[in-house]
């Protein structure tokens, strides 16, 4: 099934030249057939989650228009990650580049390969803050609840700080 609509991708890196990986990912997304970049959020720095013990992350998000299926977009994101040396030795492992489909405006998807909105979006300030910077009025398509309402004091205390202004798309 083809979908046309505004999509939001989360970008993250905590290995190598973190800012360079994020910038390159945005440029590579511009080259993906069917993807039109609309905007990029500021860059945020955050501690690695869980027990990974990895270096701090740089995170951002982009908004774009996608013409294609969700799995085609996922495949394009994985190709870009792979070009940057992404490996997946274990969940939440340190990475050179991570591109997640965070949100698909007005749509929900739950399949074995892809769940949208991202299943852990509302518990991750490093993903939610850049997304809300791009689209502050988004609501969860499953519940109707405003995404902004998930910004609890505990979530905000996850150690996320803005470290770069939004880039020109």
Image (spheres, grey):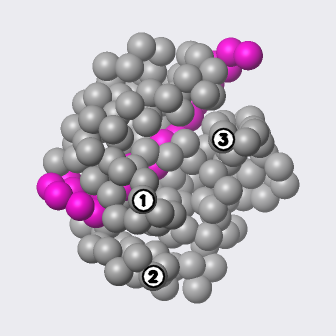
**Residue 115 percent location from the top left of the image:** 69, 45
Q: Which residues are magenta?
A: 1-19
Between disc 1 and disc 3, the foreground one is 1
Which residue does the image show at 61% across and 59% down from the upper left? 121
Left-right relation of 148 to 110: left
- The image quarter containing residue 130 is bottom left
Left-right relation of 20 to 13: left
Q: CA distance from mark 1 to mark 2?
A: 14 Å
Q: Are marks 1 and 2 in contact (CB under 8 Å)?
A: no
Q: CA distance from mark 1 to mark 3?
A: 19 Å
Q: How many marks?
A: 3
Residue 16 magenta-highlighted: yes
The image shows residue 144, relative to residue 116, as above or below, that is: below
Residue under numbered circle 1: 89
Left-right relation of 52 to 85: right
For the C terminus, the quadrant is: top left
The answer to whether residue 162 shows anywhere in this view is no
Give the numbered dot on residue 51.
Answer: 2
The image shows residue 68, relative to residue 112, as above or below, that is: above
Between disc 1 and disc 2, the foreground one is 1
Q: Are marks 2 and 3 in contact (CB under 8 Å)?
A: no
Residue under numbered circle 3: 114
**Residue 48 percent location from the top left of the image:** 39, 74
Foreground of the two, 5 or 86? 86
- Mark 2 or mark 3: which comes first in sequence? 2
Which residue does the image show at 50% across and 29% down from the upper left? 75
Q: CA distance from mark 2 to mark 3?
A: 24 Å
Circle 1 SS class: loop
């Amino acid at each position: 099934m083809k979908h046309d609509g505004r999509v939001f991708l989360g970008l993250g890196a905590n290995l190598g030249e973190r800012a360079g990986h994020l910038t390159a990912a945005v440029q590579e997304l511009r080259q993906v057939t069917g993807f039109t970049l609309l905007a990029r959020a500021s860059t945020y720095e955050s501690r690695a989650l869980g027990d990974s013990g990895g270096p701090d992350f740089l995170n951002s998000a982009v908004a774009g228009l996608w013409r294609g299926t969700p799995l085609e977009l996922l495949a394009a994101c994985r190709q870009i990650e792979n070009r940057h040396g992404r490996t997946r030795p274990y969940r939440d492992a340190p990475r050179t580049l991570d591109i997640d489909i965070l949100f698909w405006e007005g749509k929900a998807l739950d399949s074995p390969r892809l769940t949208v909105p991202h299943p852990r979006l509302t518990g991750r300030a490093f993903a939610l803050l850049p997304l809300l910077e791009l689209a502050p009025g988004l609501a969860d398509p499953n519940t109707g609840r405003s995404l902004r309402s998930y910004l609890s004091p505990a979530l905000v205390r996850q150690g996320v700080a803005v470290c770069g202004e939004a880039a020109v798309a």
